[in-house]
Every structure is written in structure tokens, then in C-alpha cells.
Image (spheres, rainbow, N blue to C red):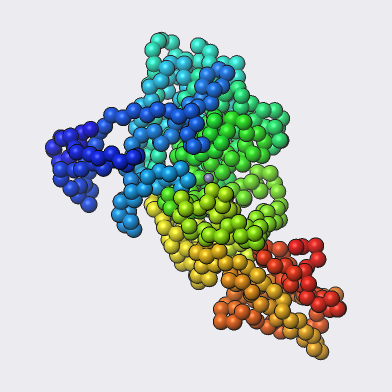
Amino acid sequence: MRIEHGGQSYEPEYLIDGTIMRVSLDEALGAEDGSLSLSMDFAFQIPEYGADRMGQFDAAAGTVFQLAQWYPRMFVFDDVNGWNVMPYLGQGEYYLEYGTFDVNVTVPREMIVAATGTLENPGEVLTAEQRQRLDEARTSDDPVTIIGRGEAGEAGTRPDGSGPLTWQFHAEEVRDFSWAASESFIWDAARAETGDGNPALVQSFYPEEGIGSGPAKGRNAGWEHSTEYVQHSIEHYSERWDAPYPYPTATNVAGIVAGMEYPMIAFCSVESRGPSLFGVTDHEFGHEWFPMVVGSDERRHAWMDEGINTFINQYSTLAYYDQSPAQVRQSFRAAVREGAIDRAADRPILTYSDRIPYDQLGFLAYNKPAAGLFLLREYVLGAERFDAAFQSYYDRWAYRHPQPADFFRTIEDVTGEDLDWFWRGWFFSNDRIDQALTNVSTSGDTTRVQVAQQAGLPMPVELRIERDDGSAATRRLPVEAFFSEDTYTAVVPGDAERVVIDPRGYLPDVDMDDNAWSDGAGIRAPGGSQ
Ligand SMILES: [Zn+2]
């Protein structure tokens, strides 16, 4: 190991403890614009299967190697914790600093390499035919074959000569660098519009084993449709949240890894087909926005990338399959009610990533935070206010390191709404929602509806009041009506026949048995919507 610093070159003392290395500098590095260079030799054993983050898939035409977390890297130094010295533990991913990468990958000549960044020396590692096809792909909406099914692994796919080849990649403003290599890769590519005039090159690398059958939206679609999926994800997220994909490439690689995200590159299962291949691809490329651009601390706060990503994935999936938003509403409500009622997840979302029991990870890091943001957008704030705030969060924290409070503060700041009650109930605690009708009475031409919030998390109340003359009205009670008392009595004109809480079916109310009232039958469960 060598350090070059302030004109000096020396071999520093260092200490290795597990996966952590501390390097002792002879002279402190200045806080303002201080810089030094550190060089070291290291070796890395590629695992057969590395905790679903990397590994090897034995394709018939040659092993697919997917490499990640393969080089020593700096911990993040931030203004909240100082040095974030946290060894990698598997659950709870990474907290990484941004930088520029120039990486030379030297592999046997037969291998094709996919990586974070742009390929800097196509003239040395691709044939003239492949370079011409790649140029065509850069301006094509339809996938262009770079290496076809019959070509993968053939000698003609490699430049003339002998000995290994070095593939050179360059990437800027990224927090990691991953790559894959195989003799078995089929390769296709297309253009994705990002909305800022800089289209991205979207690509897929997969062995023959990844190929399925039928149309892209069918059940058996395979990796031959991966590039279309990546194209949809890049274009959808860029446009939907007014956040143009900032990188030049987006590459999906089929292999042993079920689904894992890295800057500009994702590893997804070679065996995935149809909606599950679309789903995993769309999820991993949603991560390009969170946490690849908005560099949250995944090591502590899994929800800040997984939950926010799961939230935006729902809209992307709806758009791709042209589904109705009611499906998202119902599945989120069911998931949160289930988690809340059986107390499967009795910890708050803000539990540190590595302290969440494995069987609660899907709920606490993915579904519950996503459902919370969905409720905020669709039920509490409305799309117009939420979207402006959410986009501001992205803009303000791109290439930086937001804490949970930075997210909460940005949403409140831009919407102009105090949402402390919601953050506390949904994120900081595991409070439930339990709205109830506790008394309904009619007198003359007036109906009095008493509503109670019987669990820890109050929410705005929506009431549908159906009158005996056949007319109906919707009344919304602000959450502030329940800040000092658990009950509130709404006085509505007309002689009510029937009253229902949450008629649109958004809230994961843990007890629905008291959410409706009808003249004669009294307080009961709303029919058919439990
Ligand atoms: Zn994820």
C-alpha cells in the first residue's frame, strides 16, 4: 500500500479487523479540498453465490460471473455521524460515497463484459460489425441485436488476435462499480428517452437459458424482452417524477442473482419470466433514483431506498400493464392490515436495517413505507401537492446523503403541511388506524355522526352519507379535529339512511366492524368491503 500526499510518498501503517481496514496517515488530510492518493494491491475470490448480491451461473455456453462488492472502498464521512464505520452484515445494504471510476477489466478474449459506466475502448474489444450495431441501437426505439442467439460464444464475435482483452469503463457521480462477464452472453440494446435530450443506452446481457416465449406482457416472456422492460423503467421514472435518468447506460444482466441493483447495472434472475421478470427489472432500475442518485444510508434506513422505490414501482407497473389504481389500493391496504392485525411486524419502520427480523423485512422496509407514501399522496395530500414535494426531495438530495428527517422535512416544507402525526404513527411507531362510528342520530332534518379514532394513528376521516331522499354527500373531517379529543361529531344536513367511513377504501383500518351505520341495523361492518 502506498500513499501520495503533499509531495510525500510513503507506506502507511494499517490495521485490518474483519472486513474493516484503518489506514494511519502521517499527516491529517485537510477538511477543505484536502486530497491524497492511496494505492493498494488486493485479491478477490468470486463466490459461487454471494448472498444474492453476486455469484456464478453455469450456463451451457459458459459461466456467467456477476461481480459486486469486489474492491476496498471508503466509508462515508458525513456531518451527522462522522465516519460511518459499519461492517457489511448482509441485511442492510450499503452507505456509499460518490466518485468517478475508471476501471480496466482484463478477461479471457472469449468473454463479453457488462459494467457500470460507458465502454471507453469499443475499438479494441468489439468487432466492426458489433460497433456498427451498437451505434444503430443508440438511436433505435426497438432493441437491436449486438450478439445474437446463434452468435454467442462463436469465435467470430471476438476481435482477431490472441490473449486476454482489457475492457475500459468510465463512470461519473456513481456510488459503486459492478460488472459481469461471460462467454455465453447474448446482447441486445436500444435507446431510452430520458426527457433531457440525453437518451440512455439500455442493454441486456443473458445466456440462452434466459430465453422465454410469447409476447413481452405474457406469462412466459423471457430475457429477450428485458431491454424493453429496462427501456420502460428508464423512460417511465424519468417522466413520471420529472427526474431525467442521469446516466448514459442502463444494463440488465441475467445470472444467479435474483435481483440486485448497482449504478447503471442490475443483476436479475436468469430464470425469471413474465410479470416477475418485469417486476424485478423495474424494481432494480427504480433503485437508480433511490439510492443510486439520492444517496441515503441503506445500512441504517432500508425503507429510504426499498420503501420509496416500492412506492414508485407501483405506478410504473400500473403504466406498463395498463392496470387500474384500485388494484394498488387494495393490495397495499390488505398488506398493511395483515401486518398490523397479526402483529407480524411489531417494530417501527425506522428500526435499523440489520435489527429487523428477516421475516419482517418485506413489510417494514418495502410494503409498509410504500403504502404510507401511497396514502399520503392519494388520501392525505393529493397528487399535486405530494408530487411537488417528492420531486423536491429528489432534486435537493441528489448525490447527497439524506437522513429520514430530511425526507420528512422536505415533504412538510414543500406541501406546507405539518405531518408530524403521520410520521410518528406510521414511521416512528407501529400505531394502528382504527376509525369507528360510535353514534349516529337523526333529528328533524339533521344527522349527527360521532366518529372516534380508537387507535394510535389518527387519519383524516371520509364519510359518505346517504339520505332517504336518495341523495348522497361526502364529508371530510381533517385530522386536526382529533388532535385534542379522540371523538368528533359531524353535523350534516338531511335525514341519513346510511353512513360509511372511508367509502373509497384506502385505510388499513384494523377493525372494520364499526365502520358503517344504517337506519334500522345500527352500527356494523360496511357490506362487502371488509
Ligand atoms: Zn430493492
449 vs 415, left or right, is right
Front residue of this view, candidates 365 and 322: 365
Q: Is residue 414 above or below residue 27?
A: below
Front residue of this view, candidates 4 and 17: 17
Image spot of residue 377 (x, y percent): 59, 61
Q: In which quarter of the image is the N terminus?
A: top left
Image spot of residue 509 (x, y percent): 67, 66
Residue at image coords 76%, 81%: 440
Front residue of this view, candidates 10 and 288: 10
Image spot of residue 330 (x, y percent): 70, 56
Q: Looking at this rendering, what residue extends furthest in the bottom direction?
A: 444
183 vs 478, left or right, is left
31 vs 234, left or right, is left
Q: Looking at this rendering, what residue extends furthest in the top direction?
A: 161
Question: In the picture, residue 409 is in which quadrant?
Answer: bottom left
Q: Quadrant of the C terminus?
A: bottom right
Residue at image coords 50%, 31%: 49
Q: Is residue 274 above or below residue 241?
A: above
Image spot of residue 420 (x, y percent): 50, 70
Q: Confirm whether residue 195 shows in the render.
A: no
Q: In this view, does 261 lie above or below 516?
A: above
Residue at image coords 62%, 36%: 277
